[in-house]
Amino acid sequence: MRPGFLLGEIGNGLRRNVSMVVSVVLVTMVSLFFLGIGLLAQQQVSTAKGYWYDRVQVSIFLCTPDSTDVASCAGGAVTQDQRDQIAADLEGLDPLVAEVYYESNADAYERFREQFRNSPVLDSIPQEAIPESFRVNLSDPSRYEVIRQAFEQAPGVESVEDQREVVDKLFTFLGVLSVGALALAVAMVACAVLLISTTIRLTAWSRRRETAIQRMVGASAFSIYLPFILETVLATLLGAGLAIALLWGTVRFGITGFLSELLAGESGLISLVGERDLWLITPFLVGGALLLAVLTAWTALRRHVRV
């Protein structure tokens, strides 16, 4: 097939079915956008886990005067001897215990007042009710149970808590959001497949005379199908390009721009997905979209254009 004739057929096909082409472009764009968001969200969860799991602490809360309902606090508030013994036991767990920070009652109360400064019940909570604690960084955060078993019933200890429980809830929420985005993307991909099939069928019907003439002169199936497939590929490429542009804008201005500055101002350095992560998934998004478009177009042509 001559290139000039092929280009002419593609141009005529695009002009005849502008609304269908626009629909394919838009559905492809939305599908790939949500698919990209889902993949980036999963990447963010993995990145955040690697960052935060190395920084989460085990908190050993010590007894307060009001902790007498706990067996290890039957004697009331923690004593200096008990406090010293806990510190010595933590030192004995080296190298599992990487770092220990002692937070006094005054420091804990000051942090409490800062965190809940807008709470209406803030002034009704006395300083004595806020427990002092040892904040422990572990060289292997997954071995939290070693600390819990060693100190949960120790004299002067009210409770042992692992911050990973709180972080895991956040990661679970983020994971649900990413799965939701991927599920929506799958639904949109299904819509794109149906729309491409419908477009191919209607286009083939409108050009049935041309295809009949081509069959009569002995044209091969490939040469008859090729203009339809290339029209679909062009529409898919345009939709993919728009989707990548939207994803780039989201990452550039929404994540590495606004969100990173917001989180940096609140909690210091934090690892977020960036443009590099987007470019890593771009070949899979575009390649997958093109492969799906070609397979869908070829299947629809085999069903509706008899050669």
Image: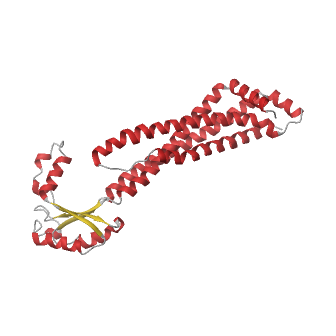
When the figure is inspected, residue 58 is found, relative to residue 126, above or below; the finding is below
Q: Which quadrant of the view contains residue 79?
A: bottom left
Where residue 85 appears, as percent x and y from the top left, is 16, 73
Q: Residue furthest top?
A: 15
Q: Which residue is found at the position 73% from the left and 30% from the top?
A: 10
Q: Which residue is found at the position 17% from the left and 44% from the top?
A: 117
Where residue 47 appears, as percent x and y from the top left, is 42, 53
Say whether residue 106 is visible.
yes
When the figure is inspected, residue 168 is found, relative to residue 34, above or below; the finding is below
Q: In the rendered view, does 209 fall on the left or right side of 246?
A: right
Q: In the rendered view, does 104 fall on the left or right side of 214?
A: left
When the figure is inspected, residue 53 is found, relative to residue 190, above or below; the finding is below
| The N terminus - image quarter | top right
Q: Which residue is found at the position 13% from the left and 58% from the top?
A: 105
Say whether residue 28 is visible.
no
Where residue 193 appears, as percent x and y from the top left, is 64, 39
Q: Residue furthest right?
A: 217
Question: Nearest the camera: 187 or 227?
Answer: 227
Where residue 27 appears, as percent x and y from the top left, is 58, 35
Q: How many marks?
A: 0
| The C terminus - image quarter | top right
Q: In the rendered view, does 57 fall on the left or right side of 276?
A: left
Q: In the rendered view, does 164 fall on the left or right side of 183?
A: left
